[in-house]
Amino acid sequence: MREIAIIPEPKKIEVEEGRFVLSGQVKCFVFCDSNEADYAAGLLSEYVKAHGGPNLPTEKIEASNGSYSIVIASERPEPPAGPTTPRPEGYELTVTREQAAITASDAAGLFYGVQTLIQLIARDKPLSVPGGQIGDFRDLPIRGIHVNLWSMTPTYEYLEEFFRRLSRFKINTVLLEYEDKFPYEKHPALRHPLALTKEQVESLLRTAKAHHIEVIPLVQSFGHLTYVLKHPEYAHLAEQADSTMSDLIPQAWQYCPLEPASLEMFADMAGEVMDLHADCRYFHIGADETFHLGQCDRCREFAEKHGKSKLFVDYVNKVGEFIKSKGRTPILWYDYLTNYPQETEGLSRDFLIMYWQYRTGGASAPFVRWAGLEFSGRQLFDQVPDHVLEIFRPYWDEGDGQFPEKIKGFPYIKYFHDKGFKVLGAARYQGDWRIRVPNTTAFCEALADEGAEGMVNTHWPGRTIYPLFYSGGEPLEVSWLPILATAEAAWSPGLSSRERFDRKFASAFLGAEAEADALVRSMYMMGGIINADTAGEVERRSRQCLSLLAGVKDKAADNRLFLDYMELTAAVRAAQAGRTAVLADVEKAILAHFDREKFSQWQASEVPHWTGFLSPGSVPEGLDQAGIGLAQIDEAIEKLVKVGAEIEQIKEQCRTVLARTLRAGEIKTILDNPLPGEEKVQEYLGQLQMIRTCLKVEQYFRDNFV
């Protein structure tokens, strides 16, 4: 018998003899008067029919016990008694040879019971379900995925289907960060050409509601506001920073908290979003990474008198008051409350704190994150201020005498609970799966142990095609394994091993069995930084993944789009690793043997009225001593030309695959960015071709004049 593979892992599974066969005589009996129950029954019927099973006519029967039930049987059954242990979003599923029955105490539980039944259906003809009983309920109330529309903007059709697919694995929350992709009307300058329309937002919210997904909108209130402040009409709202920190963090990065129009601007934007999100209970105000806090003249003067902590807390309290006035609960990123903790006590307890931690993978760790950095060992005493140590050491120190070498994992959950706040966790589902999956799993366990509200795994897309995987900047479709790890760990923290989850992913998500186990392992192993030292191993692992993909793709019954993206991912990483190795080899074998700073001097010597000339002395010094001649130069040029052609092939492959999920304008932006090493390939090729020319000139003079 095949392994029962359900994501997320149910709390109790008892397998019994026999199977319920979905024959042509069965019907779907719905025991409750509920549109939500009708919709769940319809999804089940659609699935059965789509996979070669019979039509499932639906018959509604009034239930007197207030429960939600669906029974699949050939004859009209007695009304189910309802769940023996009612729990929010919980359900019970009983399968005998005669019927499959789902009972729940609420509509969400019935919906999730249907999703479990769908995963249980074996696709051998005729379709059938193994006998047994499942009793199931969730641990964390909020089980969410963050979707950031900043870049890698998906098509509306893909985004809607993405929501549906999330619901199949009991994800019940999407944190939707619009940035400039919302159809703003009061401030139309903010509306990006790729923004969703009002009708699309409304339709997306209807789809989410039908699938028991709560959408939490996020509009930045403090930092991450370049998309607003770049417009001249809003430039006066910016904190006048001392300097630009990086290309991603310019001077016009955040609102000035002492400029009254800053709050007015946020209220305009957030108000429009809330008007469309009429049913939302929560609203996320961002407010993380306010790097320029206290830098303009007004803010600097305030901070010198009262401190940066009060400057931050006073402003976000005003933002929170506005959100509360609209009947919503405000959510706030945690980081500046710990960076400057002195006035955290003054923050309104209306806020739900979202605590992000992306690298801790267990109950303890050798480091702790504070002020945007990870500190370990003696660094904590040498570099963290005494007043900060005094506040946080009780939460960092496990009390076992091993501090600071051993530090409590996820310490800020308890810190904020002790301060009277409710807490949401935030891991990151993009990047190296070998880090992301253990981090998500351990974080969910810690959140459940501390009685937190839940987990929302975050999404921070980039704007280049490299490395498309393990960079933290990849499109949504690449990330299904860590997304499903979130579903698993948030529903049933600690219940399933990593090895079992990986096997279930192959079966429950891909519809493939043994052949896919090795593939899933190879997907993990493609990770890691690509440099001259690692390039060979990364290329080998990536090409191994490509080989395994070729053997599994045609056998996978579900989600082949994910496999297409993984095939692209493996190709991109293999090409990048190969390119890195070739560049390193050319650098070491040839270019390191002459002074490239003087390259322009020997390329061509200018004389009056002439365009230049090449002489025997134009050959770079050092090549002769290294024994480098035309043969080595020609070989290196051939390798670089091949790498250049491969870059164009990769871009074309990206264009084809990305077009299946991303907006056309977004694809152009992505492909207009050079791949890492692409410009260096052209630079080295130009240098080698000039060296080749110089060597040929030298040979010409030697043959004809010496």
Image (spheres, helix red, strand yellow):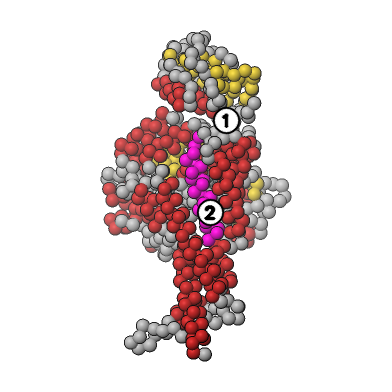
Identify the residue shown where x is 48% and y is 45%.
Answer: 565
Specify the quadrant that holds the N terminus. top right
Q: Secondary structure at mark 2?
A: helix
- Taking the image as shown, residue 605 lies to the left or right of residue 74, namely left
Looking at the image, which is closer to me, 557 or 246? 557
**Residue 703, horizontal then vertical, whole percent:** 51, 85
Toward the viewer: 233 or 431? Answer: 431
The numbered dot on residue 509 is none
Q: Is residue 382 above or below residue 133?
A: below
Q: Which residue is mark 2?
A: 573
In the picture of the structure, the residue carrying the numbered disc 1 is: 6
Taking the magenta stretch, the answer to whether it contains residue 573 is yes
- Magenta-tinted stretch: 558-579
Residue lying at the far front in this picture: please name it. Answer: 704
Amino acid on which the number 1 mark rests in the picture: Ile
Majority SS type along the magenta span = helix
